[in-house]
Amino acid sequence: MTDPNQPGRDAAPSDEPRSRRQRALSALAARLPARRRNLAYLRLWSGRLAFWGGAIGVGLLAVAFAWMADWFGSQFSMLVSEFSWLPFVLTPAGGVLLVWITRRYFPGAEGSGIPQTLAHLAAPQAARPHPLLSLRIIAGKILLGASAVGAGFSVGREGPTVQVGASLMHELHRILPRSLHISREHLVVAGGAAGIAAAFNTPLAGIMFAIEEMTRSIETRVSGLIIIAIVLAGVVSQALIGGGHYFGHILIASSTGDLLIWVVVASLACGVTGGLFARMLIRTAIGWKGPIADFRRNRPLLFAACCGLLIAVLGSFTGGAIFGTGYEPTRALLEGDGELPWYFFAFKLAATFLSYLCGLPGGIFAPSLSIGAGLGHALAQLLGDPDNAGMLLVLAMAGFLAAATQAPITSFIIVMEMVDGYSKIIALMAVALFASWISRFISPPLYMTLARRYLPPEPVAPPAPDAAPATGESGANAKGGPSPGPR
C-alpha cells in the first residue's frame, strides 16, 4: 500500500490553479508581440500604399497638366490662324492678368519651379513669407502655367511639373507613419524626379535628374524611393498618354563620315548660345540694375504687357512658330516637314527670355529643346548638308539643353529617350558634355544660382572685438615691427 503521508498527493490539487494562471499569462504574453507586429505591419503597408498613391497622383497631375497645356496651345494656334492680329491683344492682356494672379494669390509659383524645389531642399526649415511647396502651389502652377501657354508665351510645363510633384509628396509626408522613417526631403526628391519623368515620358531621365540636379549624391534608400515613384508615375503617364516617345518614333538617318565635325560644331554653337542664355536669365533675376530693372520692379503689370507685345511681334515674323512650348515646330523639323527661317532659334530664345522675365509660371525645358532644334536647323543650312539635318537637330537639342541647365547627363538621356536615339548615344553624350563644359566658362549653374533668391539671408557675423595691446615682442609686431618668423 502507498503511504498516505506522502506529500505528492496533497500538493497536486493546490498546484493546478497556479499552473492554469501561468499558462493563461504565457498565452497572453505570446499574443501581445503578435498584435504589435500586426499593428506595425499595418502601419508599414498603409504608409507604402500612401506613398504609391502619391506617386500615382504625380503621374495623374503631370498628365492633366499636359492635356491642359496642349489644349490651350492648340486653341491659341487655331485662333491665330484665323485672326492674325489676336496675339497683339491676347498675349499682352494675358500677361497682365496672369502676372497679377500669380503675385496676388500664388507667390512662389513664378518661373520654372525647379529653383524653388532646390531652395526648399537646401533650407527646409527656413522661415519664408510664403511656402515654396504646397497644395496651393500645385493649383497655381498647373492652371497658370497652362494659361500662359494658351496666351502665347514661350514656356514649358516640364520644369513646373517638378515643383508640382515635389509639392504633392511634401504634403503626403503629413499622413505617412513615422515608423517608416522617410524624411520629407527624400519624398520631395522622389516627387520632383517622378514629375520630370512623367512630363517627358522618360523614366531614366527622371532618375538622372534627381541624382544630377536635385541631390548631386544619393543614398541607396532614397534611390529606391525615387525609382518606385518614377515607375508608378510613368505607368500612369503611359497608360493615359501612350507608350510612345515624346516626339514619336523619329528615324534619324545619317552617315558617320562627318560625325566628328557635327559633334564639334554643335558643341561650340550650343555651348556658347546656351551659356549666354543661362547668363541672361541669371543676370536679370539676381542683382539686375538699371532703368529697365526699375521699370519691372515698380510696374510689373505694365512690364508684362510690354513683354507680351514684343513676343507677339516676334511671332509675326515666324508665322507663330515661337508661341507656346515649341513642340509642333520641333516635331515638324525632326520629321523633315518644317519650313522655318534660319533665325527661328534666335527669335524663340528671345521669346523664352521675355516670358521668363515676366515672372509667369512656366519652365524652359521644352522651349530649350525647340531652340536647340532651331539652332541645328540653322547649322544644317550653314553647312549645306540637308541630308543629315535630322542628326544635327538632335545633337543641338541635347547640346543646348545641357548648356542651359548644365546637367549634361540628364539632357542627353532626355533627348535619347524622346526621339528613340539609342544608336546615337555616344554622339549625344559627347555634345552634351562638351557644350555643358563650354557653358561653365560663361555662366554659373542656372537652377542652383536661381535658387539663392528663395534662401534666407545668411546671418552676418558680428565684428571681432579689438585685441588688447600686447607687450614685449608681440607688441612690437603690433606696432609694425619686424616679424620674428622664418626668413
Image (cartoon, grey):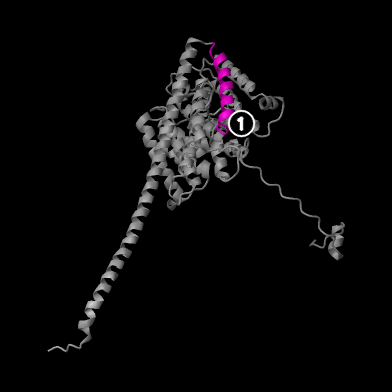
Q: Type of residue at label 1?
A: Leu
Question: Which residue is at a point 60% across and 40% down the rendered structure image?
Answer: 128
Q: Label 1's element?
A: helix
Q: Quadrant of the C terminus?
A: bottom right
Give how far across and how far down residue 200 sits, in percent.
44, 32
Q: Quadrant of the N terminus?
A: bottom left
Horizontally, residue 329 falls left or right of residue 39, namely right
Question: Which residue is at a point 68% across and 31% down the rendered structure image?
Answer: 288
Give how far across and how far down residue 409 sits, in percent.
49, 39
In magenta stretch: residue 452: no
Q: Is residue 443 above or below residue 251?
A: below
Question: Which residue is at a point 26% across and 70% down the rendered structure image?
Answer: 20
Give how far across and how far down residue 29 sits, in percent.
33, 65
Q: Which residue is mark 1?
A: 281
In magenta stretch: residue 99: yes
Q: Is residue 171 visible?
A: yes
Report the residue that reaches farthest toward the left.
1
Q: In which quadrant of the rendered view does residue 270 lie? A: top right
Q: Which residues are magenta?
A: 85-109
Name the chief secondary structure element in magenta. Answer: helix
Q: Is residue 476 above or below residue 163?
A: below
Q: Is residue 110 above or below residue 49?
A: above
Horizontally, residue 124 falls left or right of residue 481, namely left
